[in-house]
Image (cartoon, rainbow, N blue to C red):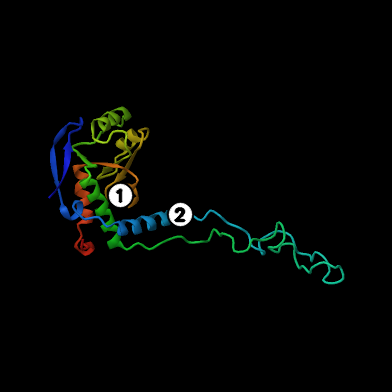
Amino acid sequence: MAKAELYDNTGKKNGNIELNDKVFGVKSKMAVIHQVYVALMANKREPWAHTKDKGEVRGGGKKPWKQKGTGRARHGSIRSPIWRGGGVTFGPLKIRNYKQKINKKMNQAAVRMCLSDKVFTNKLVVVENLPKDGKTKVATVLRRALPGDKKSTLWLTAVKDDMLKRALSNAVKSDIRLASEVNVIDLLHHQYVIANREAVEVLEKRLLNNKNKVKN
């Protein structure tokens, strides 16, 4: 049975909490995690770069010079890609689609693997209660008392917590996510994860789906 250290709201250790092995005791497969991570990053990408082709560049309606008799090469438009200021050939376009399809079964498996890795390396910390007063000082004091001080930290909540979000708005290297929405990018970009009991229950309920169960 997988276990994580349990702390009270002052940062003092208060025993351990048992975790479901099917969610927090899964063997990691780097190929699966990498594939999901790359797909998620690609889906966040927006095609900002855009170039104009010959048909989009202004000007060039008149032929530069007559076809014959000038001794120069023939040209039909100054918008040609071989002219300075002309269109661009095969340049980047803002209509490009970087989206990649992510299999739901693989996506959930990758999240379980990342959570399991946090447990194996003692980087998943469970607290009885998260700060409720909205003060950054209180959240900072609690973070210093918990393992991994000054390391990048992801706080997980079961429901939307505006007060904790307010408290962490000025906290260094701290982000907050809903347990029902946390993904591989969130888990890989933070060294430590702090969650309360309710968030752990949400994770288990979300990821304990027999239809999405994979062999490890």
Q: Residue 42 location, x and y as percent?
A: 42, 56
Taking the image as shown, residue 14 lies to the left or right of residue 59, namely: left
Locate residue 41: give its quadrant.
Answer: bottom left
Taking the image as shown, residue 191 lies to the left or right of residue 85, namely: left
Q: Residues within 10 Å of mark 2 (few under 14, many from 20)?
A: few
Indicate the quadrant containing the C terminus: top left, top right, bottom left or bottom right. bottom left
Q: Hey, which residue is sitting farthest right in the picture?
A: 69
Please state which amino acid type lies under the numbered disc 1: Val
Please state which amino acid type lies under the numbered disc 2: Arg
Locate residue 54: give its quadrant.
Answer: bottom right
Secondary element at image label 2: loop
Q: Which residue is mark 2?
A: 45
Q: Residue at x 16, y 38 (%)?
A: 6
Query: What is the C-alpha distance between the residues marked 1 and 2?
Result: 19 Å
Q: Residue 170 location, x and y as percent?
A: 37, 32
Q: Residue 68 location, x and y as percent?
A: 84, 72
Q: Residue at x 25, y 54 (%)?
A: 113
Locate residue 160: give its quadrant.
Answer: top left
Circle number at residue 182: 1
Tell how many labels: 2
Q: Residue 181 location, x and y as percent?
A: 30, 51
